[in-house]
Amino acid sequence: MEFNVMKKKTNEKTNNLIAKSPFVAAFAMIFALGFLANGTVCIAEETPEAAPVETTEAPATEQQPDAPVAEQPEDAAAYEVSTPFTVTKLETPVTMYVTETVNVRDGAGTQYNPIGKLGWGNCVSVTGTTDNGWYEISYNDTVAYIIGNYVSQNLPGIPYLFVGDSRTVQLQMAVGSNDKAYVAKVGEGYNWFKNTAMPQIQASAGAGTTMVINFGVNDLANASKYIKLVNSNIDAWEAQGITVYYAAVTPVGDCSTVSNDQIEKFNARLKAELDPRIKWIDGYSFLKQNGFSASDGLHYNRSTYKNLYSYYMSVIGTDV
């Protein structure tokens, strides 16, 4: 009996297992599909290896260098275009003289670079002329150029010659001697002018010289003698190419030896009686109007002399 019962239970278990088998299989299949859907398990198909493709390598080309880039000036407007010129060479160099301070340049034109300077009286060896009015010269063993307006075949006179007494001596001390000469001595007047200064004028002045005479403060009573001496020489000076100015005796301050009334009378007479070819510079009125400083009443300070010189040159420049 017990045996039959056990057999019956065993058969029931077997039947239950068989009955449940389809459900187990279905569950297993669903579980596997879930893995595949989630990508947790992935088996890739093996693809056949592609056949190698033959490639033809292009021949290497020689690398061309970059084309040069033209350099541009930082500020093209600052560079002037040099004007071309033509030089006519001289068969034999000619010695000429500089009449005023002038730049020496590396080309025939003011747009060319200055490479030096020449002053009044310097001699130069001219080797050619240009078609625009310049001279080709030999300068420090190189070819250079100077403008023709400042060159002469004859030794020129000094550009400016100042002749006078102590006031002219102090004028020289204030403004210097560049392109100027001075024939002057402290305390002198008519006699020194006639006997000593006149020969020195002949040696210093020449064609193109502007001469400024300023005598009288030490001997205002000699107005007639000054007029006669200057007028008697104007023909010779003019023939030499000398331009003559007579500068008025300038005012004094607190001075015991001379008065401004005496100076005004002297000036008025010379201005009226000097030859018309002798030009008058009214430094007296200039200083009276613009002021002056004279510590001893007779001689000026440096600033006053500089102002007076500037006035002289402004009058001379207006007449040129």
Image (cartoon, rainbow, N blue to C red):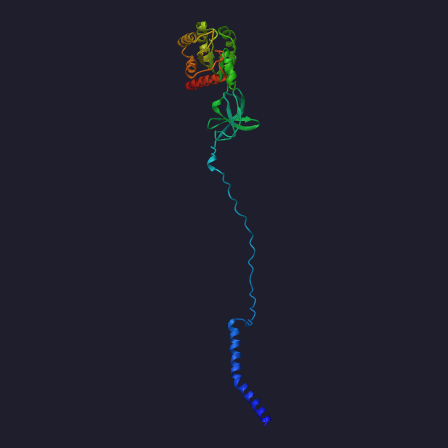
In the image, 255 versus 52, the foreground residue is 255
Looking at this view, name the residue that lies furthest to the bottom.
1
Q: From the top left corner, tell me how far across and down residue 63 is, in percent.
A: 55, 51
Can residue 208 be seen from the camera position used here?
Answer: no
Please identify the quadrant where the C terminus is shown: top left
Residue 237 position, x and y percent, is 46, 12
Q: Is residue 307 visible?
A: yes
Judge whether 13 appears above or below 148 on screen.
below
What quarter of the picture does the N terminus occupy? bottom right
The residue nearer to you, when weighing 191 against 29, is 29
Residue 263 falls left or right of residue 176: left
- Foreground pick, 162 / 299: 299
- State the image coordinates of residue 317 (x, y, percent, origin top left): 43, 19
In this view, the residue in front, 311 or 78, is: 311
Q: Residue furthest left?
A: 272
Residue 269: image location, x then y, percent? 41, 8
User: Total label count?
Assistant: 0
- Left/right placement of residue 207 relative to residue 49 reads left
Residue situated furthest front in the rendering: 2
Residue at screen point 54% across, 86% down: 16
Where 49 sits versus 188, above or below?
A: below
